Image (tube, rainbow, N blue to C red):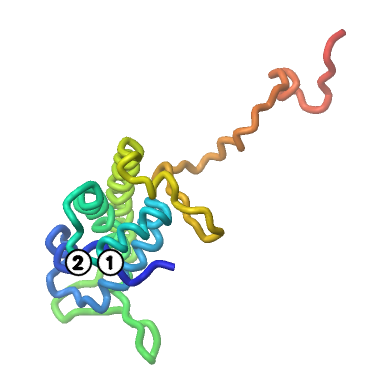
Amino acid sequence: MSKNILFISEQKLKDTSFLSDNVDPKHLLPTVKAVQDMYILPLLGTGLYNKLQELVSTAPVPVGVYKTLLDDYLTDVLVWYVLANMPMVLQYKLLNKGVMLRNGEYMQTSTFQEVQSMKDDCLVKAKFYAQRAIEYLCAHNTDYPEYINPGSTSDTVHPDTTQYDCGIYLGNHIVDSRSAEEKYQGNNYRKPY
């Protein structure tokens, strides 16, 4: 289980994104924690994630490969995943009367489609930066031994190898040794003598 140690400060997040300075930390910090658990942990794997949490908890993070990873790669990933997750948090409020839509005096609320479009745009950028971080980690894996060996317990999360997926099932990587005629002629195929 991850600790409540955040890889990015509230101020850094606001300075490097289009989040307004008046966004309440009460809404922002749980979102950052959720993003770290949902997206950053699978990106890094348990070993490297725990190592970074340890280093961040004894701030400041010493200059070196871990600081480079945090500052040059993970900050961008965190910013865009947080931005993708913030619209719902900011637009709705949970009250004892139920779920309420926030409606400012001088602002017009966005439609669900507009919010979804913004979220999708942020997710595209987040996946781009996440893939860039994965490629960096793979190219410099000797600098991060925790990335190569994330652990061996039953709750270990192994690092993702890509951020991109497709909606087409491409098979289960089992090599089929049958000929093309056998594969595509159904059960009626008989080998000629």
Rendered residue at 37%/60% (across/down) = 50
x, y percent for residue 137: 33, 42
Viewport quadrant of the C terminus: top right
Mark 1 crowd level (few <14, some 14–19, many ≥20, 10 Å Cα):
some
Mark 2 crowd level (few <14, some 14–19, many ≥20, 10 Å Cα):
few
184 vs 119, left or right, is: right
Residue pointed to by mark 1: 6
Disc 2 residue type? Ser
Residue 104 visible from this viewpoint: yes
Disc 1 residue type? Leu
168 vs 115, left or right, is: right
Rendered residue at 56%/35% (across/down) = 170
Tag 2–tag 1 contact (CB < 8 Å)? yes
x, y percent for residue 56: 25, 63
Q: Quadrant of residue 118?
A: bottom left
Disc sitting over residue 9 in the figure: 2
Q: In this orientation, which residue lies closer to the viewer: 38 or 46?
A: 46
154 vs 99, left or right, is: right
Rendered residue at 39%/67% (across/down) = 2
- Element under disc 1: loop
- Residue 58 vertical placement versus 64 (above, below): below
x, y percent for residue 61: 20, 59
85 vs 182, left or right, is: left
